[in-house]
Image (cartoon, rainbow, N blue to C red):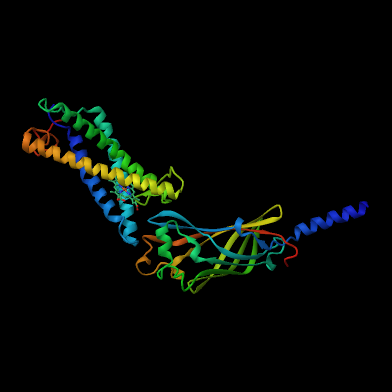
Amino acid sequence: MRFATAALAVLAVTTAHAEEYNAIQADKSAVAFVYRQMNVPVDGRFGKFAAQLKFDPAKPAAASASIDLDLASIDAGSAEANDEVAGKLWFNTKAHPTARFVASSFRPLGGNRYEAVGKLTIKGRTQDMTAPFTFSTQGRAGIAEGALTIRRADFGIGEGIWADFGTVANEVQIKFRLLAEAQPNKK
Amino acid sequence: MTRYTGTAIALHWLMAILILGICGVGLYMTGLPLSPTKLQIYSWHKWAGVTAFLLALVRIAWRARHRPPALPVAMPHWQQIAAHGGHALLYVLMVAIPLTGWLMSSAKGFQTVYFGVLPIPDLLAKDKELGDLLRDVHATLNYLMIAIVAGHVGAALKHHFIDRDDILTRMAPRHSRKEQSA
Ligand code: HEM
């Protein structure tokens, strides 16, 4: 009996360590961004996105992730900006309704810090991108939280009259917080 | 004492030009389609508005220590009251209009960064309804100011050309040094 309890305890500890977080909870996740207009930081976010994550902090090399942002769900700070960025000069949302990030590898950076290396595609243009993040657990859930800076011109976001960075800066910071539960049956 | 101080005169005309300019730009800019130019004009409107607010504080501090020359004794009592009331209201608007502009901008989610360098803190968090309400307050105060300024200018001209008193000239910049008062 005592042996059985000890064995169970060991088993519990090992599974806790080998936990794979694989079921994204969209309502507890968020993808937001900050851009600068006339040197004023403006907050925006994506209302809808679909993300896949398989992440075991003990085995980052085996992890995988992808995220599809629904560009029509963008909140760029004001109704006027939302209308504007759907247009051809910005996202051309009709022709390119989603932006997509696919991670191809994960690297541990020490402690609870990791980075996902992958490709980001917006408006038909693909760029290599590295997304550093921290991974923490909260009960049955794991939370990947990080930020990366992209240059809008690399993707042709804001062309023509908007191409000059004096009014809208080139750098846009993207912040993400993905909460995934560990569901053993979802493997 | 028959004239305003040089400082009062300088502040009066500097602010008159600045505020009317800002007001005109404000009325013009809201109708523009979104473009970099529009964003630049909005920024200049805000920067000039913050400048006008700072000047208004200086002006009110100066006014508190320097009584203006008395109104002509021949002026009817109701006109004296209207003049003092109008001036008081103009001081209130000089402060209230930029304040509502700044609060509106915060409520709409756009911080004011003075000349693109100095961030002015947001007192209000982003709140669309409140932003729209403050926009209406900002606009209404401006229409009130336009009405009072029209009356103010009309009264000054009436004093000068009909009553032929010194109301306008005592606020006019003087060229001759001799005549300048403290
Ligand atoms: C002397 C000071 C100021 C004057 C005379 C002034 C005047 C005006 C006027 C006439 C309008 C147009 C209102 C309308 O018809 O919708 C306007 C709009 C506006 N003002 Fe001001 N303003 C002043 C200061 C400021 C300041 C300090 C700020 C912000 C820091 C500001 C922010 C705005 C904004 C954002 C709008 C546009 C509202 C919209 O897009 O609907 N203003 N202003």
List x then y, in percent, for residue B60: 27, 33
The quadrant of the rendering that contains the C terminus of chain A is: bottom right
Residue B118 seen by the camera: no
Q: Residue at x 43, y 66 (%)?
A: A86
List x then y, in percent, for residue B158: 10, 37
Numbered-mark total: 0
- Nearer-the-camera pick, B129 or A18: B129
Tell me: residue A111, above or below residue B158: below
Q: Quadrant of residue B11?
A: top left
Q: In this view, which residue lies farthest toward the right?
A: A1
Q: Residue at x 74, y 60 (%)?
A: A19
Q: Residue at x 61, y 63 (%)?
A: A115
In the image: residue B39, left or right of residue A50? left
In the image: residue A31, left or right of residue B36? right
List x then y, in percent, for residue A99: 52, 68
Q: In this view, which residue lies farthest toward the front?
A: B78
Tell me: residue B97, above or below residue B178: below
Q: Quadrant of residue B176?
A: top left
Q: Residue at x 18, y 37 (%)?
A: B9
List x then y, in percent, for residue A16: 76, 57
Tell me: residue B137, above or below residue A172: above
Q: Quadrant of residue B3?
A: top left
Residue A30 seen by the camera: yes
- Nearer-the-camera pick, B120 or A48: A48
- Nearer-the-camera pick, B170 or B114: B170
In the image: residue B110, left or right of residue B64? right
